[in-house]
Image (spheres, rainbow, N blue to C red):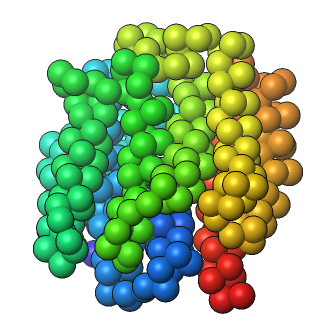
Amino acid sequence: MKSFVRKWIVAIRAPFFTASVIPVLVGTALAWNMTGRFDWLKFILVLIGVPMFNAGTNLANDYYDHKTGNDEANLTPTPFSGGSRMIQKGVVPPRHMLIGSFVFFGLGSVIGLYLNAVTPGNLILYLGIFGLLTGFFYTATPVLIGYRGIGECIVGLDLGVLAVIGAYYVQAQSLNWSVFWISLPIGFLVAAILYINQFPDYDADKAVNKKHLVVRLGKKKAVYGYYLLIAATYLVIAGSVIFKIVTPFALISLLTLPISLGAIKILKTNYDKITELIPAQAKTIQTHLFTGLLLSIGLVIGRIL
């Protein structure tokens, strides 16, 4: 039983669920900051539901990247890119990965349908349908979202803007422009995680015609795209405070700037290398994680004080 659980923890890439947990924390904290509303049960359900969709997406991606030959062509996977490798290692049969994807999407959908039923309107339903379809068809044929140069935008939208909005709406049961603006930095950072992970996957992705932005731009030019995502993150946070969209305590999230600058420095000199780039991948994940956590804490402090 332990080996079974351990196998699927690796397959769904559970250690990287911070990408789906952070937007839930930010959206929930903003809802409490602005409305004073907080429901523990709804919070826990969203905290489970969004990662369920994330797991379904990861399993579907591994299955279809296997079908296209993408993961087999990747001879230099890193701890952060190249898929879970469970199919390539013969640990999980491809068919089981696809079935697992359906199971996790199904579990997430059940949670989503309940939340939609206890929340005004059908916003949660629409967000869930969009998240399911874009998650599954990110690498599924014939849509292949991740192969068409728009994958970064879709991931930033799903695990940034829409996840924050959904978590906020479940609690506040209303919307305003503040939630949109504060969701953008989370979207930029989760897109940055995907973006930097495309550098070590470049050769394999190019070989199977996976034309994401790094392949389209080329590694050298693509470096500037990463700079833009990081800069936009901090500029939006600072601007949101300057224009009084959110509490000034949100500025504590800028404390992660040294981490992101460290990633930039590594990427600048090692964009065409594999092993040397791994620390930049790790720092990008840390930037997303700690920026989101500090932003959430700032929003909570802002409400208390």
Q: Is residue 173 above or below residue 123?
A: below
- 78 to the left or right of 55: right
Q: Where does the N terminus fall, quadrant-wise?
A: bottom left
Where is residue 123 drawn, in percent x and y? Answer: 23, 59
Query: Could you say which is closer to the camera, residue 17 or residue 63?
Result: 17
- 299 to the left or right of 104: right
Identify the residue at horizontal 82%, vertical 60% (top origin): 255
Q: Where does the C terminus fall, quadrant-wise?
A: bottom right
Query: Could you say which is closer to the camera, residue 69 or residue 165?
Result: 165
Where is residue 2 drawn, in percent x and y? Answer: 34, 75
Identify the residue at horizontal 38%, vertical 52% (top origin): 162
Q: Is residue 65 above or below residue 121?
A: above
Where is residue 187 drawn, in percent x and y? Answer: 52, 46
Query: Could you say which is closer to the camera, residue 206 or residue 229?
Result: 229
Q: Quadrant of residue 267?
A: top right
Q: Quadrant of residue 223?
A: top right
Where is residue 118 drawn, in percent x and y? Answer: 18, 78
Query: Could you say which is closer to the camera, residue 166 or residue 86?
Result: 166
Q: Is residue 303 above or below residue 177?
A: below
